[in-house]
Amino acid sequence: MALHLRSSSSKSAFVNILRHNLCFGFGSPSHATRHLRRNLPHDAPIRVSQNPISRLCNTMAEKLSSIGGHEDASNQVMDFPGGKVTFTPEPQFISESNKERVPCYRVLDDNGQQITNSQFVQISEELAVKIYSDMVTLQIMDNIFYEAQRQGRLSFYATAIGEEAINIASAAALTPEDVIFPQYREPGVLLWRGFTLQEFANQCFGNKSDYGKGRQMPVHYGSNKLNYFTVSATIATQLPNAVGAAYSLKMDKKDACTVTYFGDGGSSEGDFHGALNFAAVMEAPVLFICRNNGWAISTPTSDQFRSDGVVVKGRAYGIRSIRVDGNDALAMYSAVHSAREMAIREQRPILIEALTYRVGHHSTSDDSTRYRSAEEIEWWNKARNPLSRFRNWIESKGWWSDEAESDLRSRIKKEMLEALRVSEKTEKPNLENMFSDVYDVPPSNLREQELLVRQTIKSHPQDYPSDVPL
Amino acid sequence: MSAILQGAGATTALSPFNSIDSNKLVPPSRSSLSVRSKRSIVVAGSDGIKSFGSGLITRRSEPLIANAVATKGENAATSTLSKPGHELLLFEALQEGLEEEMDRDPHVCVMGEDVGHYGGSYKVTKGLADKFGDLRVLDTPICENAFTGMGIGAAMTGLRPVIEGMNMGFLLLAFNQISNNCGMLHYTSGGQFTIPVVIRGPGGVGRQLGAEHSQRLESYFQSIPGIQMVACSTPYNAKGLMKAAIRSENPVILFEHVLLYNLKESIPDEEYICNLEEAEMVRPGEHITILTYSRMRYHVMQAAKTLVNKGYDPEVIDIRSLKPFDLHTIGNSVKKTHRVLIVEECMRTGGIGASLTAAINENFHDYLDAPVMCLSSQDVPTPYAGTLEEWTVVQPAQIVTAVEQLCQ
């Protein structure tokens, strides 16, 4: 580990460096970054503990910045808590924003042509075709479920239309051991990992095959076997959960990270700030993926925050960040791939802001034409469609064709309609499931309450839904 | 949660050992997220009535006076056992319980503000960071919602976090995570994810800590489905409840009290656990049932001395389990004495006493000879002035008056 030190002829400073080296007997960065509570000036006597995990090591040396130059009035430094800072005789306000916005990483242009000199992680034909097929599947699934809700077959739905590349390409760059903490617009990650259309439909219909046992509303998927944490409707509460899970992976030294998704609106919640701060301090391997799709129900980003999007907030917490074109599947894949590697290898959080557009309404309870123009929606749906861009690219490689497209689409559509049909017919979970799993074993008060409900049903059978078995 | 035997008087064939061999307990498996070990071990106790639970070993306290606080003129703590144990303070008992569980199960970890090398604001985690490292005893930045959320996320990947709130009042900041995630996720995930967290910390009125640090908000959490709540009051039950809470598969909130940390008592050397859903019989009696918990237990016991001198025979029960109430023990007592007085530190409106009153009236109405009386604090923020602060808390003299009134 290199210790940068302002050049100094002081012998004591040199001796102190030796002492610092003794502290870092392990050499591993994660052990060495425990901070001493008291921030001592660097030439104070330091107690070196024999215990390598001890926090009594003075880690001040790590904070010594490579200032260079000579000590004189204009380069004076002072050891305030938190590390050395140089002074300036003029009151300098950091501007509220940079002149230029943070540039956005993209590999494919609007027409799906590879941009010259673009750097990205190469993917095989098999992977590319799976990414594209899953994007198509997600799109079809969303459309059919949405229509089903409109027809009254489903109670509620929220689409991810326009964000297919974020969903699928990010999932493709992860491994099955990476734990996912979704908001609610990332069913594509589950899809990638093997959740079937039937399983999605079961949850939406809340039937007895639903892993959630029919307790939640549609799109609140969860699968412990696919490492996908059950969707909790509250905004951004999954962010601290993700940090906690990452902390757990860190303790076990697993070759995995946690990945959590949220929207531009979610970045305003207190949990966002708490979680980012914690992840940075804990050095937890989390990927924070923000789907900046321009809208939080009817609130545009201009009313959500005044910073340059979400990517600049990473620096405020000491987190490495990147802005990506969320509608570019290749760029998303590469960004997440690299981020994951960094997160695990360096045990640090990474913030990824994926710029995109929410083509669909917020949910089936929303009509977004009330607050934005239909032309704007249509433009993003057609001209900036992530699927057509990626399709152009894989076709240019000879990996796809019109025939493959129509085959895929008709197959998926058929599968979806069948899944819907089966789900609709499947029985609902029985009444006992209303009371189970509140605790590991139902306590007496819940058993009593279940009895009361059953008694009420006996006396008023006509009021009880006929499709819920007792 | 254990299925409490309602009105069961039958004894069962019990194994003759009195102490628990901790080697016989199988640590929870980490590999599967949804496996919950169901051990049913029954331990013999003094009165033969046992609760069967999902793996909790129970130990009924003997039906003798368990003195945990030396009221004037009495000897300091008598042990609740036949053989002598070791003496310690309540915060040390909590620490001992925590340390034993951390030794036993590598998944147990602690997170909170200043819990690491500082040892915790009330020294409950003292020495643990040195022993277990600062990843297992984690110091967090100041954001209760974030570290409670962290604990929940860690729990569903297999860890068993003990989340310390520096003061229970700060849990208000964590309410979203506790109510929406902690309590709910086991249910909404269809049982796929368990959240075996323990959230603990001191609450209650201290010595001039000011309104914001004198919160009694147990009842705010009472409605949350999916969580359990217990309040400790003696070193014995502090250690026992801590251990039981950590071993429970459900999220448990353990309420401690700022003024009880320095209570001294002798506790057993061998391992033991207290049942999370059981109330503690502090003093059996015939005339009136006094229900209380946490620090008010001591005010009640002090009042009990006066009452005994005046010829009354109060039965004092430390309810310990705030959610769910141990209506079995409470019910048996009500059926015997027919009079109930609840003494709590909560506010009058919407406190634990309020819901306990409702529960008793609903379940044991026929057995009552007098309306249930509840002594609580007034509905005011706790004043800083020491004299006023004392007046917001129920004092022994009021308890004596209330008993006399009820027993007319």
Image: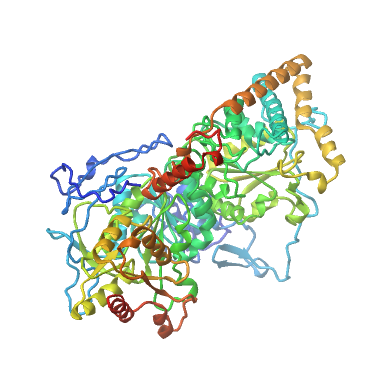
Q: Position of residue A415 (x, y in %)?
A: 65, 21
Q: Is residue A429 left or right of residue A397?
A: left
The quarter in which the C terminus of chain B is drawn is bottom left
Q: Residue furthest top?
A: A403
Is A285 in front, or is A441? Answer: A441
Q: How many marks?
A: 0
Viewer-proximal residue, B88 or A461? A461
Residue A248 showing in the rendered view? no
Within the image, what quadrant is residue A47 found in? bottom left
Residue at the (39%, 59%) spot, across then down: B362
Question: Of B350 and B9, which appears nearest the observer?
Answer: B9
Q: How is the image coloured?
A: rainbow
Q: Residue furthest front?
A: A459
Seen in the image, is B135 located left or right of residue A70? left
Q: Position of residue A267 (x, y in %)?
A: 66, 51
Q: Is residue A308 above or below residue A39?
A: above
Instruction: Name above or below for residue B113 compared with residue A90.
Output: above
Q: Could you tell me residue A90's position as x and y percent?
A: 73, 70
Asked if residue A440 is positioned above or below residue B171 in the image, the reply reads above
Q: Is residue B351 visible?
A: yes
Residue at 76% x, 51% y is A301
Between residue A69 and residue B408, name the one nearer to us: B408
Please name the residue shown 32% across and 38% down the image: B38
Q: Is residue A238 left or right of residue B401?
A: right
Residue B143's spot in the image, x, y percent? 53, 59
Q: Is residue B43 above or below residue B298?
A: above
- Is residue A394 left or right of A212 when viewed as pictured? right
